[in-house]
């Protein structure tokens, strides 16, 4: 293999280096032109306003739309700091989501025995790019809000984290079969399409999708599967399996995802809706975990449990409750949804994924179809049903906060009556419950369509000759992109008394120079 | 061994599958009948009330009783959302505790070299069951609060997490020697008894146990030890030891438990008491860590440190300060308690546990007696002593918040005088300091008694022929319940170029069907 | 080797035991004399004050000085609990920093294949000592605030965590080449000098260093390098390299540090400055990650990525933006700083560290010079430049909160005018922008000088004959301080069917007694 590596043309392998440097430079320039602090992060210019130290934490977050900025007031962004504690309100849940993105997704994908470096580190790189790029894309699609700048506050950071989840889900579908360069390009394209579809769903269709199950999970899964379909070659490899240690590392990802999913599903909600989203997600996940264990044992050899199911299907309840998480679905309803999702996901891993692999030629390394795809579609349907049943009797004024399009239109009798009761009410579109439900379904279907078409086109792009493909013997193998420590013979990748694999921090062994370091091959 | 596995009757091994599915169905039905959102998670039905967006975060949490709901007002649960930010107040500490339960306990128990899957995954399953079951049991014992429903808010989720800690402590005592089915049944029974004893302590004895050192730690430890005593067979096994990697994984659990213990001990406290609980726990744990290292080196071979002590005894200070954490024990007092607990715990591991194993026939896999048992008893005694010294001069009005039973009885001169100063004062039982201390001791002793008797009975139940026992050669072995990746010969469970162990996500190798997958034995 | 171990004198090896016990006793006595709860953790003695439950969370934290207590009012510490929710304000970010210290630093240093136990556990021990000792040292240097006690609240715990970071950075420079006893003594001395230098910078020079990049990172790095220079012997060892598993463990540390760095840089800021610190750190780190990957690939063999760079250089952006994090550097400015720091850090690992090792005889095990040293100096310079450009037009009243020394002097016309607008303004020193920038540079230079001199002196102390040195064959080897599980031949430190390495929790194998346990050598 070492001979083959040397014979490969060196140039394409390096393309990601100038590309990354150029990309980062462009991002900085774009940020220089377009991005400024939002008002809660701006200095207090004028006197006489409530000083920060006595500002109350106002439980703000007056929007449950993932894409909507919440802190802009009418009089521009030099407005006094009366909402200064936006940060305190969002920060704890933001950090939970942040952990999910980088530890959760990153370690969940370390399950392959020889792809641990790539899983956690490429997850890291892709997300770091996406955080910056999504800030711009989401800002542009949001129309710059009548200003010439994107004003960033903690909610933008949270939204950028959500966006990066989309890309990381797609990454899961093609884990081990793409080069870093392909992944970077895929991420950049995907974010643009994602931001457009998010805008369509939230601003045009005005749907409620608090946990982003449609806009993030369905989108990311089917986009990734479409890319995987196009890139499909012969993927059979001895590397595509876990080791005892790699499976244990993956559980770190699983558990952190499971723990912080309530923050993912409620981070952008407010008031009682946020509280419901936490409760519903908590019980949905608990129920999901139980059925996933039971089903795993049912369909596996000797009725043992299967780590693949435990690592992934236990999380399906978080996805499946995502759209309806803040609605009045009641704890038992959330548990029904979670249980069904856990069962569906295990069956997916056991039966659908192998079939998709064989019959449809779609390779899905992490099984994102079972964790994000099907549970996400389920979430969209559950959300539409729950929205169809939402009445003002049950929701009170919360109905209009949750489904702003259901507020009556301006100058109607109903709106005037409402306005007399709730002074802060803005006019809406006067949608009925079934109308809202229909739009929820539209958003699900357009998301599916946009994701699949976008993924197919992206896949074709990534097959262009400008892109290297992963050589067959380097599928699911860190050695494609990393120098793996040379360990004892027969002891690949383990703690051992390596002769080589010196500490890079203190430099290579005497005599070796850049370009002259002896090749480390196995 | 593969022959033996095949010869074993298959039926009993499957019993957990229908049981889990039935259990989850029952939980959903019970939730459907009995569980509703509590007021802060209910929509705002009536107009004219403070809208959520301007509600102040009120630093509420007006109860230091673990079992007491804090957000129910007199006028029922359709009350306006003036306490809407209950969630914001409790959520960060709730998530810390959540991490302790699933990452902390889960990874702490991965220290066995061949039981890592089971440790983290069965911890996950048991806790997911318990969260749901404890919501019901704690709700029922709390008498449904004069309503026909259990109203859940973030404090119920936090209390359910506390309850699951109890079960996971008991799990530690029998780690590796029980089947999943036995563990599930044990958990269900234990939670019922736990909830009863918790109710007895908090509502009847009206004790202060903010970190639940008696009600959770003492209970869980002695319940588990009693179960272990009854289940005891010949447990000697080569599997019962760590590997270098498994010990490192366990440190993830240790550190997260250590870090978030201040949240465990203060999550349900309020105001100045909560602040004290954080400070006291922080310094107690720091002091405990130092003495644990010193003692570990003192009693170990060649004066080296012992990972068992570092993983466990460094945490004993969190348990030992638990009951008195929010009392006026002062930082130096907390450090004395922490230091003593660290030392006691190391001595326990070095001398008591081997003796218990040999003389009393009690096997304690994780040494829960040294981490939860003895330090928990110590906490109870420290709590009683500190309560005996609590005066109104030192505590001011906080005295009556901390020990509500010390508020004078209704219509006494003392009560009328107090009420004139503190309008929100509810009448109490007029207990003296020593009286309160006596009740603290009663709670400790009844907890010990209830746990031991409950554990013995549960142990006998788990020995009934309906339950499979773990076969001798599968003690402390993941292969009982998991398909462990087939690694290179002599390289059990390590990263390696496995020929088998394919990725379950993309399906078994061509030609294999359910039930026909070739057996993977070592 | 086992023979050599036995022949070594046993006494010096034990010295840390009585020392640790004595130290902990002294800490308790000093806490008994000098440490009390601060007012938000004190009971509410007098009636008629705002009860805790209705106290608003006031977003307090009215100081951006790391060393300044924020909750002391003029009328002493028995003042009513009107700031009771200090805890709620600081706690989430405190816990993030807490995770960085113990998980972040602890696991980042597990990258060595045979030093994982020591990395995470000695990090744990040293930090636990430091938390207590720093509480005292920072309190004493702060002059006890006119009282005879140090009053501790959550901000003291946070400051103590910052202090411990300093020591852990130094630990990184000498990882694997010092005994536990040497590390403990080094930590105690370093904290005293650190607290003095911190006082000098914050109170005398009145600099702004919100992320403590100068006072913690620069200090810790150069102190550690100076110690390493003095202790330098022949450090070449086959042990100084990673394994596949150890490198994956290290990524846990990396990612948690990266995620929570915004909390580190903003935890002690307030209002809009805090919000800016979060945003700037987030984008600086994202940009840093991208350039670090690109540069890593550029300078490494075969244009692969290098785990050393990914583990460390991706974090340099957090350090480099630290001093200016809360200033008006704008997101694009933060990204420029982050990108430059990432590139500088990779180049440092690739070229400077090997040169320092060979030419200057300074061994830097973790490369702290590249992660904390150079990026910290960069942070100081960036901070000075940004301070030089700070105008009242841009910062408004925030200018005077951020640079209190720029407030005009008492009784000047300018001060009287300001005071009429901002009632809470305290008089300052009337510094100009360039004046402030000069003081920022003074603080950087004195920090460098104090750290290097202090480190050299400490290094010489640690070479005294009273201290054992690490024997040559135990460099970077856990066996110096730990009993490492005996695994299969050729399978050092891996999951395997060990014959020995029994579970310490349940006691040694029959027949073995303390002192008689057979030596476990490899």
Image (tube, coloured by chain):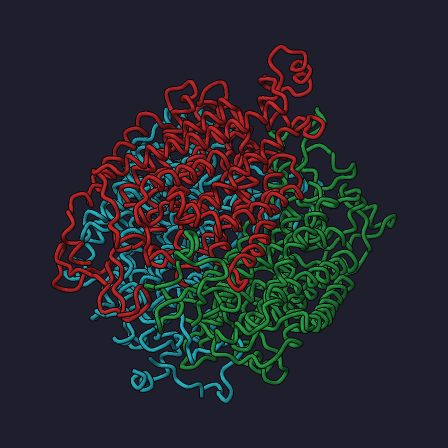
Chain colours: A green, B cyan, C red
Q: Residue at x 25, y 64 (%)?
A: C486
| Vertical comparison of C83 with B300: above or below | above
Q: Say whether residue C88 is left or right of residue B130.
A: right
Q: Quadrant of residue A359?
A: bottom right
Name, please, the residue furthest toward the top: C411
Q: Quadrant of residue B450?
A: bottom left
- Foreground residue, C297 or B488? C297
Q: Say whether residue B289 is left or right of residue A92.
A: left
Name, please, the residue furthest toward the front: A511
| Vertical comparison of A330 with B496: above or below | above
Whole-percent x, y for residue C410 in the image? 60, 12
User: In the picture, which quadrant includes the N terminus of chain B?
Assistant: bottom left
- Foreground residue, B192 or A88? A88
Q: Is residue B34 visible?
A: no
- Foreground residue, B301 or C48? B301
Q: Say whether residue B246 is left or right of residue A129.
A: left
| Vertical comparison of A420 with A457: above or below | above
Whole-percent x, y for residue B292 in the image? 27, 46
- Foreground residue, C233 or C243? C233
| Vertical comparison of B234 with C464: above or below | below
Q: How many marks?
A: 0
User: In the picture, which quadrant includes the C terminus of chain B?
Assistant: bottom left
Whole-percent x, y for residue B376 in the image? 29, 47
Name, please, the residue furthest toward the right: A411
């Amino acid at each position: 293999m070492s001979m083959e590596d040397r014979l490969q043309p060196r140039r394409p392998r390096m393309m990601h280096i100038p590309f990354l440097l150029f990309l980062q430079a462009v991002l900085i320039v774009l940020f220089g032109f377009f991005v400024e602090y939002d008002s809660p992060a701006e200095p207090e210019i004028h006197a006489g306003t409530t000083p920060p130290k006595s500002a109350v934490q106002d439980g703000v977050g007056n929007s449950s739309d993932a894409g909507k900025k919440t802190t802009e007031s009418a009089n521009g962004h030099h407005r006094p700091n009366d909402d200064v504690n936006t940060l305190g309100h969002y920060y704890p849940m933001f950090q939970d989501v942040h952990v999910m993105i980088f530890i959760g997704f990153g370690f969940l994908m370390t399950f392959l025995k020889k792809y641990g470096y790539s899983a956690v580190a490429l997850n890291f790189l892709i997300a770091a790019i996406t955080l910056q790029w999504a800030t711009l894309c989401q800002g542009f699609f949001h129309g710059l809000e009548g200003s010439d700048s994107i004003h960033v506050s903690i909610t933008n950071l949270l939204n950028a984290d959500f966006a990066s989840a989309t890309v990381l889900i797609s990454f899961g579908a093609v884990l081990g079969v793409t080069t870093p360069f392909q992944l970077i390009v895929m991420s950049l394209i995907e974010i643009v399409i994602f931001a457009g579809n998010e805008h369509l769903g939230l601003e045009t269709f005005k749907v409620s999708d608090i946990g982003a199950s449609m806009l993030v999970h369905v989108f990311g899964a089917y986009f990734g599967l479409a890319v995987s379909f196009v890139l499909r070659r012969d993927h059979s490899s001895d590397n595509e399996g876990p080791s005892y240690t790699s499976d244990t590392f993956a559980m770190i990802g699983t558990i952190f995802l499971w723990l912080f999913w309530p923050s993912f599903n409620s981070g952008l909600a407010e008031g009682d809706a946020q509280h419901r989203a936490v409760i519903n997600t908590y019980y949905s996940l608990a129920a999901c975990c139980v059925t996933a264990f039971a089903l795993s044992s049912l369909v596996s050899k000797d009725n043992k449990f299967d780590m693949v199911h435990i690592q992934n299907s236990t999380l399906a309840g978080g996805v499946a409750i995502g759209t309806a998480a803040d609605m009045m679905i009641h704890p038992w309803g959330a548990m029904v949804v979670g249980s069904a999702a856990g069962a569906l996901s295990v069956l997916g891993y056991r039966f659908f994924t192998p079939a998709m692999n064989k019959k449809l030629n779609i390779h899905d390394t992490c099984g994102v179809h079972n964790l994000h795809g099907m549970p996400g579609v389920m979430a969209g349907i559950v959300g539409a049903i729950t929205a169809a049943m939402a009445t003002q009797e049950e929701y009170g004024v919360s109905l209009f906060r949750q489904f702003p399009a259901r507020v009556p239109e301006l100058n109607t009798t109903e709106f005037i009556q409402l306005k007399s009761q709730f002074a802060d009410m803005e006019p809406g579109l006067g949608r009925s419950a079934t109308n809202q439900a229909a739009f929820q379904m539209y958003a699900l279907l357009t998301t599916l369509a946009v994701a699949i078409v976008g993924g197919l086109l992206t896949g074709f792009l990534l097959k262009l000759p400008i892109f290297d493909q992963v050589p067959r013997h380097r599928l699911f193998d860190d050695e494609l992109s990393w120098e793996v420590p040379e360990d004892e013979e027969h002891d690949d990748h383990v703690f051992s008394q390596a002769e080589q694999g010196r500490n890079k921090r203190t430099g290579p062994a005497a005599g070796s120079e850049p370009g002259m370091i002896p090749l480390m091959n196995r």
